[in-house]
Image (cartoon, coloured by chain):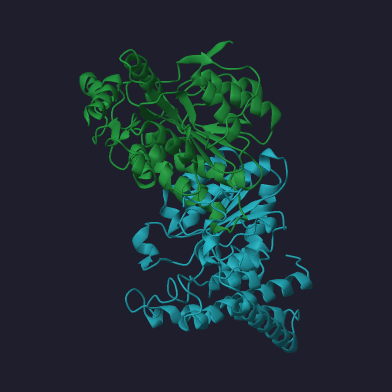
Chain colours: A green, B cyan
Amino acid sequence: MREISYAQAINEALRENMRRNSRIILMGEDIGRYGGIFQVTAGLLDEFGPERVIDTPISESGFVGTCVGAAMTGLHPVAEVMFIDFTTCAMDMIVNQMAKMHYMSGGRGKVPFVLRTNIGAGRGAAAQHSQSFHSFFMHIPGLKVATPATPYDAKGLMNTALADENPVMFIEHKKLFITKGHVPEEAYAIPFGKADIKREGTDITIVATHALVQKSLNVAEEMSREGVEIEVLDPRTITPLDKEAILNSVKKTGKLITADEGCLTGGFGSEVAAIVAQEAFDYLEAPIMRVGSPDTPVPFSPPLEQFYIPDEGSIKDAVSRILAYQ
Amino acid sequence: MGLSKQKKLEMFGKMVKIRFFEERIVDLYARGLVPGLAHLYIGEEAVAVGACANLRDDDYITSTHRGHGHVIAKGGDVRSMMAELFGKTTGYCKGKGGSMHIADVNIGILGANGIAGGGLPIAVGAGLSAKYRKTDQVTICFFGDGASNNGTFHESLNLAAVHGLPVIFTCENNQYGISTAQKTHQTIKDVSVRSTAYDIPGVTVDGNDVMAVYEAINEAVQRARSGKGPSLVECKTYRWRGHHEGDPNLGERYRSREDIKPWIEKCPITRFEKLLLKEKVLTQAKIDGIKEAGKKEIDEAVEFANNSSFPKHEEIYQDVFQEEMGGSR
């Protein structure tokens, strides 16, 4: 099977859906001529023209709200917000309009709208271009939140997002854009709310998202040589969340580590830990460990930034602490 | 302006219906039958009616927290509105939205909105969508003088101007953002001057003169329908009641009875009534008939709302998502 990058996989999904469905338009800053800051929309302006691939002014609230209105009146817009940090400039439109419209109107208004953005530190871009607060959107009822970790998942989840009549936060990871993987040329859909067991194991469950999926797999391979079999579960969407798969895995292994790049406090891992503590308490054989970013803004200086980003070392540390527990 | 007699009568009937609807809410709120926040439109009826008289069913509006007038003017059903204000399942939003979130997309009402300035980008989206779909639908975007200081005002007018979208930004300048008078929240007197910043037409009209509103919006709607882009129309008016029911209305905190009195004398309904009598469009008997019919419709709406059921607890989980997967349980 051919290999393409995560960015190309999303590009391909957008392109194929736009060919099939004329309701789809793209809006965002520098997505047309420039192809998007991470080149995810490269070439789409040439194929679909400026009516469908719209370079916007620097107006996050304006163009995100425009997408809400366009979605309510028959289109299926896809917005690119250049960094998740910039979604704060559009937060009313996301939280109060996009997410709540369907409910507030008793189901009369629908908002089929995909908002693409990205998380992740590691590019020396400091605190306002690097944060990973995707779990914030889990806290907003009415939003679906997709978190692709591989090129294969990115294309399949985007296909599903564009077939869904609900608002979707499609949260990419900027360090994954250039990673390559097998992606079928044909269209396929990955259902929302269906976790993927990226590696089976019997001893410890790691529920991992985004870049920490691969890092967890790396640790799992290493630990396997020491006779510890780690199961790596990628939820792929954090809303809806495949609680059943998480609980089943923990019931099998009796041990849980969460690995997510958000700050630890109030993050995705905390939610998963709470679910497991509440619904699978009797199966737990060790304390739950959370791997995540420290509760600080993302620092600039390279040694500090590298220290900030959770990596294989952080995961191994959590594994040893679990194994040390008797 | 050659408006037919029938059209003028319809407009008068809608203004009366809005007034009666709102006056009834005053009473129902005081008696505890309408919970929450009810922001009343009394005194501003000419704006909604004069503006929406230019629209077709398939045109759009975005409304505000003070939205009852817009919804009635656009053709909303008062029974569904009243039931919504009571929080009943037969309401427009099944009791989930209340006064500030009434929407009826089938007749282009894209929702009242609890966020000041929240509707502006949504109106731009409706305009973008109409242009993209190559229809000649237009969108009237209602907002207040207060919202004209919100960032969304700038972002929306700029976006609509850049793309030449069929949106009529309609500022209801009722001179207050809650308690903050216009002169203390902006240095300009006319919000319409801000149109210059986007190189689009801007005009200020007497918002208590329904025909003046109609004509100004008519010109803007024609521009929009023919692909010439957005306009900003400011309608100067006044809110008679408090910001919402329960707000210390006669306002010793921020305005006096003397401030309000001249505006009550400039009542937009009395003014239109006098004009229609003078033009012999109406007779006193006809006026009485229209008012009687309006009262009866509101009576029936209240009865309908009263007789309707409250939602059951399990309904809380419905409508979070389109396929009703529900919230987390």
* Residue B209 position in % (x across, y down): 60, 71
Using the rendered view, name the quadrant where residue B249 is placed.
bottom left
> Considering only vertical position in the picture, is B52 above or below B169?
below
The quadrant in which the N terminus of chain A is found is top right
Task: Check the image and name the residue furthest to the top.
Answer: A2
Using the rendered view, name the quadrant where residue A221 is placed.
top left
Q: Is residue A267 left or right of residue A180?
A: left
* Residue B2 position in % (x across, y down): 76, 66
Q: Nearer the viewer, residue B14 or A323?
A: A323
User: Which residue lies at the image location 37% right of the left edge and 80% below the top edge?
Assistant: B256
The quadrant in which the C terminus of chain A is found is top left
User: Which residue lies at the image location 76% right of the left edge and 81% below the top edge?
Assistant: B280
Q: Nearer the viewer, residue A246 or A88?
A: A246
Q: Is residue A32 visible?
A: no
Q: Nearer the viewer, residue B158 or A198?
A: A198
> Considering only vertical position in the picture, is A127 above or below B270?
above
User: Which residue lies at the image location 37% right of the left edge and 25% below the top edge?
Assistant: A212
Q: Is residue B166 left or right of residue A304?
A: right
> Considering only vertical position in the picture, is A263 above or below B109?
above
User: Which residue lies at the image location 69% right of the left edge and 26% below the top edge?
Assistant: A19
* Residue B162 position in % (x across, y down): 56, 38
